[in-house]
Image: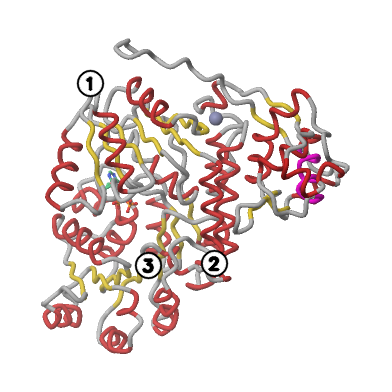
Amino acid sequence: MTRDPATLLHEVFGFPAFRGVQKQVIDRVLDGKNTLAIMPTGAGKSLCYQLPALARDGCCVVISPLIALMHDQLRAAHAVGIRAASLTSVDSDWRETQDRLRRGDLDLLYVAPERASGEGFRALLREADLALFAIDEAHCVSEWGHDFRPDYRLLRPLLDEFGWVPRLALTATADAHTREDILVQLGIPHDGMIISGFDRPNIRYAVHPRDGLSRQIGDLVASQPGPGIIYAQTRAATEKMAEMLGKDGRREVRAYHAGMPPEMRSANQSAFIASEDMVMVATVAFGMGIDKPDVRFVAHAGLPKSIESYYQESGRAGRDGEPAEAHLFWGAEDFARARMRITELEDARQAGERARIAALGALVETGGCRRAILLRHFGESPPATCGNCDNCLNPPPRIDVTQVARKFLSAVYRTGQSFGLGHLEAVLTGTRNDKVAQRGHDRLSVFGIVEGEEAALLRPVSRALLLRDALTTNEHGGLVLGPGARSILRGEDEVALVLPPKRKPRAKKGQEA
Ligand code: ADP
Ligand code: ZN
């Protein structure tokens, strides 16, 4: 068998050409250099270590965090005739696998990080000929990342003991900070980082503040033919929404979540894959590892976990390259809840989590191009406008609300940073109710300083201030000045509001939308 990469690609894998950065990654690995490959889901990461495993002498050790993932990969490798095995708690053929490794009868060996870092495994590797270490889901090594696994931190001594064996770290999801961490933790040089293009030009991105979610989602489902996925926040919400959407009987709607009986779950998944117009209401557990290229829309009923998750989940639309849509519905409560959860984390993880939420805030709040925000997050330098997102297609009018924002922040400060929006509104608009009078807040300089049209801006302004961390909430829901408040109060920063689109009149029952 010849071991030229292009020939292996055709003859073993049956692909006509390399995709994206695959060739670049594989060439570097075949040169024996340590590499970090950042490629979106579906870009073909596995080939980047499978092919070198065949082209180089010896076995490629693949470190992978999940047994299910390993077994999927094993099946795929066996299907194209690659000699592959795994050493996990559910494998019974350990002896044979170890013998095969020693004999040089394995191209790929899958193992979990906790096993890989153990002394027993290192002793085994000393008896084997190694081609490559592939570290899959490499963002798990970073505490900054969203999926930290302490076991990944223990890999370094293993990699260093076999320092002559090249390492290839792979991940789909890494912001700048996480990437830096992966390089340092795994001993990969800066120029060894290869990032593939993240743009999905056929996906049209749109973001909407929640304003009658059922109606909003109903309208979307009515106007979008073709298969679609709606991500709901909770298991209960998936079932409720599926029932609500299925009521008018125009489309088949099913639900999917991890709490369902397995038979029902897999029946719903198979039905969706086969269908040309089904809507699936699911938790984010749905879609991982399923291959349905013709999903025409993905909607999120609430804030995703991070920009990375959003990119990945919305990216399940339009795999076939045909036009597809991604809709995100959010509310200020989503941010409040996410921030509350941060306070429950260990200190080391709080900064990363806060940055993730701020990045989501920027995505939903922007009056500019959504795609540009997504791509910049992945380290690209996209043009300022894309022509295929809600804001590029319909640039929203913006108004400067810096003065109102300063008044609002002053009122928060003067009233002692412990009151909610309602009380602050009353103070600012000069409403002398009992609470205002009891606290003596009608004697404050900020009493009644907001008049006329400005009053209607207080709620959206408070929401914008929460999003940019100029306001935060205490455990009782009272508003407190945040780190972003200072520069606004000093007049160094402006606050602008994107005017919300006019609400569409509700379609009457029985009338076609
Ligand atoms: P990732 O791990 O990056 O999500 P996979 O390795 O699972 O992606 O590959 C995604 C799909 O793309 C698989 O079905 C794989 O067979 C296919 N694929 C990979 N490389 C190529 C290629 N060069 N040409 C065509 N298809 C490819
Ligand atoms: Zn755009």
Residue 479 in the image, given as x and y percentages of width and height: 68, 50
Q: Which of marks 1 and 2 is nearer the N terminus?
A: 1
Depth check, front residue: 75 or 344: 344
The answer to whether 225 is drawn above or below residue 298 in the figure is: above
The residue tagged 1 is 250
What's the amino acid at mark 3?
Ile
The residue tagged 2 is 349
Mark 1, mark 3: which one is toward the viewer?
1
Quadrant of residue 115 in the image? Answer: bottom left
The answer to whether 414 is drawn above or below residue 56 in the figure is: above
Report crowding for label 3: few under 14, some 14 to 19, many 20 or more residues within 10 A (C-alpha). many
The residue tagged 3 is 135
What's the amino acid at mark 1?
Arg
Residue at image coords 23%, 21% = 250
Quadrant of residue 119 in the image? Answer: bottom left
Query: Relative to 474, is 181 on the left or the right?
Result: left
Whether 408 is among the magenta residues is: yes
Whether 294 is among the magenta residues is: no
Residue at image coords 86%, 46% = 490
Task: Identify the magenta region.
Answer: 405-414
Residue 193 in the image, given as x and y percentages of width and height: 50, 59
Mark 2, mark 3: which one is toward the viewer?
2
Q: Main secondary structure of the magenta part?
A: helix
Residue at image coords 50%, 38% = 330
Task: Report how far apart the C-alphas of labels 1 and 3 lie in the structure.
Answer: 47 Å
